[in-house]
Every structure is written in C-alpha cells, then in structure tokens.
Amino acid sequence: MDAADPLAALRDRFVLDTVTDPATGLPDVYLDGNSLGVLPRTVPDRIADVLHREWGELRIRSWTESGWWTAPERVGDKIAPLIGAGPGRVVVGDSTSVNIFKAVVGGVRMAGKGCTEILVDATTFPTDGYIARSAARMTGLAVRPVEPARIADEVTERTALALVNHVDYRTGALNDLPGITHALHSAGALAVWDLCHSAGALPVGLDAHHVDLAVGCTYKYLNGGPGSPAFLYVRESLQERFESPLPGWNSHAEPFAMDPSYAPADGVLRGRVGTPDILSLLALEAALEVWDGVAIEDVRTKSLALTDFFLECVAGYVPAGRARAVTPQDHRRRGSQVSLRCSGAGEVMDELIRRGVVGDFRHPDVLRFGFTPLYTSFADAERAAWVLGEVLGALPEVGPAVAGG
C-alpha cells in the first residue's frame, strides 16, 4: 500500500524517524498530528534567515523590505485553497480563541434585529463554549447548546448564529457543514465554523457552501508549529459589514496616521488586531510550502484509506472486546482521526508512547490516533495497531471496557 501511495514521497518533507523505540530500534510512529503536526524541513533554514538577516541585519526595515507587514494576508492566501476559499478571504494572526471571539461577536453584530440566542455545538471543544458564553453576555444574548445533528431542527428566527465544530475533537466525527450551513441560512442565521480538526485534513469548501465565518488553528494538520497563529475567514460578501470587537491599529484603514478615531481597513484586513507575531507567522509560511503541488482531495483519499486500514488492523490485532471505535465508519461522517474507547485508556496510552507509538488520551476513556496523510504511512498504521494489541493483551481486563456510546 505504501508503494502504491502517490503521496508517499511527501514524508521526506518532514523531520521524522529521529527518535527510536529502545526496545525495537524502530522509529516512533507519530499519530498525534491532530494535536501538533511534525516539523517540516523547510522551517529551520527559513527561521534562521529571519533571525540572522531579516531581524539581525535589516531590523525594522524588514517590515517593508522583507514583507513582514503583509504577512497576515499573504499567509492567509496560502491557507485559502486548502479550505476552499478564494484570495482575500483569510487573514492569519492571534490565537484560535481570539479569532473565535472576533467571529462570534462580529457575527452577532451582523445578525438581524430581534435575535436573542447563539447556538453552540453541544459537543464542542470547551474553549468555544467559554467564548460563546462570554460573547453572549457582552451582547445581551443567550447561549443554547445543541447537538450538531439537531441544529437544522432547532434553529429559529431568533437565532443570530451557530458556532459548530467541523470535526468533533473527541470522536473524529465529521459534521455536515453544507447541510447545517444551509439550514442556518434558511432561518436567517449565520454559520460560524471551527475548522481546527479539518483544515489540512479534508476538503472544506467554505466559498462553495457560503459559510459566513470560520476559524482554525494551524499547528495541527497544517504543521505550523506549537502555538502558531490561527486564521479567520470572512465571506467576501460580508466583509464590509464585519465589525471586529477588537479594533486594533493593525486593522485601521490608515494604521500609521495614528488617528484617535477608528476606521476599519477594507476587506478581510479588518480581521487583524495588533502587531503580528512575525517569528511564528513566518515559520507557518515556510511550513505551508510542503503543500506545493498537493491537492486536498488526494489528502482526503489517503486519509480515508489510512483510517480504514487502521480500523481493519485493530480488528485483527486487538483482543475482542478490549477496544471499540467511536469514530464513524461512514466516510461521510469521518474526519482524519480514529478514536477508540477502552478501560484504562490513560495507562494504555502511556504504555503505547513508551513503546514508540505516539497518540493521545482524552478523559475519561478515549484513545485518539491522528492520521496526517502528508507523512503517515500504512506501515505506521499497521505497527500502531499491532502494538496496541500487545499492550491491551498484556493488561488485565477491567470491567465492561467498551460499554456505552
């Protein structure tokens, strides 16, 4: 399968195979790219140049001569094709949390009169819920948690917007972005999507599906590095109405006029706030070079093949009844990770990592394995399942390991 993989050569674009399992002498199997992507080989030399030449020699001249000032929108345009967006619709900067705040408050400000509520994905990553509730308190609205599959039935004319995760971070379940967006629009509400677990893993189609606002991190499947800046998408037809709740000098129409009154820049630039984090931003720009010549559709094809194969191997190697997949079998409902429920999941993951298979654990009983098609091989998937079978086979069985949803 690896020999027939058209994306196999991309693995050489990353720093891998440097840590070995002391028991076997084999390199680690890294299946945690859904938390932190692997270092692309393009990044170290680029950052060295930024440090030594752009900052060390050119210093403040680099804001213009090295293109620092335009980096947020330039890097945004590099991400745009991976999430189905045209140029001028994505800006990069700030954290995911800050961008969710901008998107939710900005969305409420564009909502119709008489709106009284924000719908929030009931299975969301906690931060999204925290921020939505804070934004609701600030804007005088209420927050109503709703399961993603129920949003189409629960949205009303009183709904300002819904904040929904494209992929569930625990289970890897893929939510229906086109259908939910259409249902929201039919009720007069806006669609705000969190793409943290889908950007760089599968086609999103923001423009095609008329998504209003979207936010995503860049340190997972986009491999931008720890804490790399997030992105904000604003639909082109909404940009002149988008009013950021954080009107920083970097989003001013004339930032160097130092005008005490605020006038927003045109287009997606009004999503900027303060001075960009240049070192992280340019590391991300270099990391995105690994996508040169890569179609996101091909990435999706390999992702589904990898996760199918891993599930097949788990069924073959793991003792019966010791682990159960909570990730949907249906390709239309699956992201690019596989989550398995088992008793003692924290202990199991610790032992897997000790044996050179790196995934992660989510409380109380979920093992997560992220498959990044740019660098994950089918051999990785097979070895991970084999080691998981050994670990679970060696541990005493405790209670109904895989009961429940």
Image (cartoon, rainbow, N blue to C red):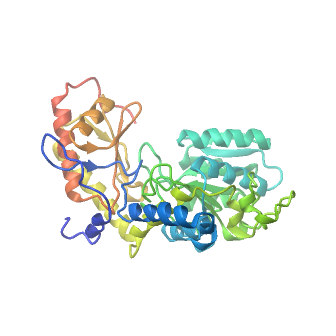
| In the image, farthest residue toward the bottom | 293
Locate residue 81, reporting x and y percent. Answer: 51, 71
- Residue 336 visible here: yes
Q: Residue at x 27, y 65 (%)?
A: 12
Residue 49 falls in image quadrant: bottom left
Residue 262 lies in quadrant: bottom right
Asked whether 72 or 7 is in front, the reply is: 72
Q: Which residue is at the far right?
A: 261
Give whichever of 72, 123 is nearer the camera. 72
Asked if residue 89 shows in the view, the reply is no
Q: Does 219 sit left or right of 59 as displayed?
A: left
Q: Is 397 placed above or below 185 here?
A: above
Specify the quadrant that holds the N terminus.
bottom left
Residue beneath the point at 30% across and 68% down: 10
- State how many labels appear: 0
Please tell me whether residue 243 is drawn above or below residue 364 in the rendered image: below
Horizontal relation, residue 54 to residue 154: left or right: left
Residue 48, compared with residue 65, is above or below; it is above
Question: Between residues 8 and 162, which one lies in front from this camera angle?
Answer: 8
Q: Quadrant of the C terminus?
A: top left
Q: Residue furthest left?
A: 24
Measuring from the top left, give residue 101's x and y in whole percent.
67, 48
Residue 260 percent across, percent down from the top left: 86, 57
Pinpoint residue 23: horizontal percent, then vertical percent: 13, 40
